[in-house]
Amino acid sequence: MEKHEQLYSGKAKSVYSTDDQNLLVMHFRNDTSAFDGKKVAQLDRKGMVNNKFNAFIMEKLTAAGIPTHFVKRLSDEESLVKRLQMIPVECVVRNIAAGSLCRRLGVKEGIDLNPPTFELFLKNDALGDPMINESHVRSFGWASEEQVAAMRELTFRVNDVLKQLFLGGDMLLVDFKLEFGLTAEGELVLGDEITPDGCRLWDKNTREKLDKDRFRQDLGNVVEAYEEVGRRLGIQL
Ligand code: TMP
Ligand code: ASP
């Protein structure tokens, strides 16, 4: 698939048009960012590791019947995806308290959340991705009531699949963020990526952090931890 002009460049990925107006090339760069772009770095191999990781996870989700934009991996750092009209809302499920939940509610990191929580955030770096609720999504027309219900249902289904998958590698899926969009046919599907950049993953026994918190908290060995997660899942990196 021929790559044409760059349509968009985000904090860690760039998106290119192709010969087919309904397909895009997603390029995973080595750029790493946190805190809404306030902390940035270049990490060797991260683009390749995340691209291969994302392809593996998207294929697992497709096999589990979850619709995604993913078509196929093209190269070390590139994948082909369906063009989506993105819904500017991030869906977060938490199985264990960490990150902004602890700061917001003053709860201790590591407590089990039963049932898991479901939260919505507006995708807007300038505003620091503020937390929103379903009523905001409706009133501002970001998505319909049915679309919010579908995003919620799909996010919990992804949680069920991924929790089991990571548990198989002795890892706990603490939390994760998903983004959705609409295909040219109007179907709501999972977009963006699933990588250790947008999840929290802990070793089940030691609770060692194996995700982007290593970068946020200056714990070192960021890409090495992503590679360890990949190794435990049997991903060829
Ligand atoms: P939080 O604790 O910062 O709210 O994040 C919860 C999870 O969602 C964590 O795994 C990181 C991910 N996330 C992103 O990747 N990007 C975002 O913009 C947000 C709000 C969360
Ligand atoms: N992914 C979000 C951002 O870039 C949250 C984070 O990673 O800290 O701001």
Image (spheres, helix red, strand yellow):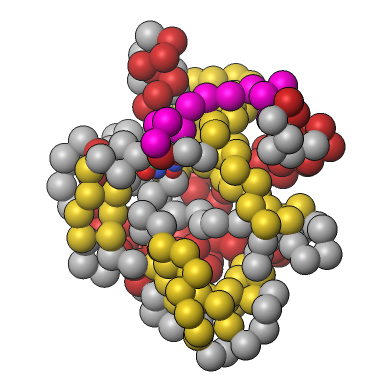
Quarter location, residue 144: top right
Q: Quadrant of residue 84?
A: bottom right
Indicate which quadrant contains ligand 2.
Answer: top left
Residue 72 locus on image (x, y percent)? 59, 77
Q: At 71% across and 64% down in the image, what residue appears?
A: 63
Residue occupying image coordinates x 36% and y 58%: 12
Asked whether the viewer can see residue 52, the reply is no
Residue 134 is inside the magenta segment: yes
Q: What residue is shown at x 82% (from left), y 58% (from top)?
A: 186
Q: Nearer the viewer, residue 4 or 217?
A: 4
Query: Is residue 175 in the magenta section?
Result: no
Q: Residue furthest bottom?
A: 2
**Side (left or right) of 228 relative to 9:** left
Q: Position of residue 1 (x, y in %)?
A: 57, 89
Q: Is residue 220 left or right of residue 114?
A: left
Depicted 180 relative to depicted 9: above or below: above
Is residue 101 positioned above or below 128 on the image?
above
In the displayed structure image, the side of residue 99 where residue 134 appears, left or right = right
- Tell me the residue at 68%/78% (across/down): 21
Q: Is 118 on the left-hand or right-hand side of 203?
A: right
Q: Nearer the viewer, residue 164 or 88?
A: 88
Q: Is residue 152 above or below residue 237?
A: above
Pinpoint residue 128: horizontal percent, then vertical percent. 40, 31
The span shown in magenta is: 126-137
